[in-house]
Image (cartoon, helix red, strand yellow):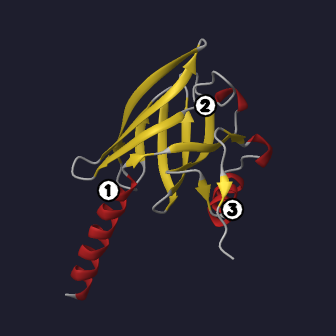
Amino acid sequence: MNVLFLSLLLGVACVAQEEELSGQWRTAYIASSNLEKIKPNGPFRVYLHKLLFDDEQGTVDFYFYVRHKGKWDYKHTTGIKQDDGTYAVDYEGKNVFEVAYASKHVLVAHNNNVDEHGKKTVLTGIFGKGNYFEEEDVKKFKELTREKGIKEQTIVELCYVRYFLFS
């Protein structure tokens, strides 16, 4: 009986967390194992606008801007939730997207991309619902970036971020 209750509680907590993650987000920093993907006009130099998680459907909708040939394009793509909790997404090839850390105001994620030529790229990003990040949030992003084998020197700041530190 306790196992059933705990399983139910965990399921409700995961749904609640995903629903909390839905909303407007801003890209703060991104990093990539392939700098071509995140350079200006690169396909993964994305300015996230909104994420909508739908646990009933097992999807996440990504709404974002990307600069292409000097013009801003508004894009939408949908990810399908996999059994392991990641999302399979078709954008610039095949992707496996995963939220590594989330709080009410910060989302740290990574993405594995295999483009149409079979080239593999690992990306990380930190997204916020405002301009303030705690030092711990940025530390988690940098740790994830290192864990994924991406050099810290590849981190690109996409919006001005101020750290909100508690003393």
**What label sits on residue 30 in the rendered view?**
none
Q: Left or right: 47 with respect to 37?
A: left
Assign a secondary structure to mark 1: helix
- Residue projecting furthest to the bottom: 2
Using the numbered discs, state the Cα–Cα distance from disc 1 to disc 3 in whole angstroms. Answer: 25 Å
Q: Residue at x 75, y 40 (%)?
A: 154
The disc, 1 or 2, on the residue closer to the chain's N-terminal end is 1
Q: How many marks?
A: 3
Q: Amino acid at mark 3?
A: Lys
Label 2 neighbourhood size at 10 Å, few (<14), some (14-19), many (20+)? many
Assign a secondary structure to mark 2: loop
Q: Residue at x 71, y 49 (%)?
A: 149
Using the numbered discs, state the Cα–Cα distance from disc 2 to disc 3 in whole angstroms. Answer: 21 Å
Q: Which residue is mark 3?
A: 139
Label 1 neighbourhood size at 10 Å, few (<14), some (14-19), many (20+)? some
The disc, 1 or 3, on the residue closer to the chain's N-terminal end is 1
- Looking at the image, which is closer to me, 34 or 140? 140
- In the picture shown, does residue 2 fall above or below 88? below
Q: Which residue is mark 2?
A: 45
- In the picture shown, does residue 151 fall above or below 6? above
Image quadrant where residue 120 sits: top right
Q: Which residue is mark 1?
A: 19
- Looking at the image, which is closer to me, 90 or 166? 166
Q: Are marks 1 and 3 in contact (CB under 8 Å)?
A: no
Instruction: Quadrant for the N terminus, please.
Output: bottom left
Q: Left or right: 52 with respect to 161?
A: left
Using the numbered discs, state the Cα–Cα distance from disc 1 to disc 2 in whole angstroms. Answer: 25 Å
Label 3 neighbourhood size at 10 Å, few (<14), some (14-19), many (20+)? few
| Residue 51 percent coordinates (x, y) | 39, 43
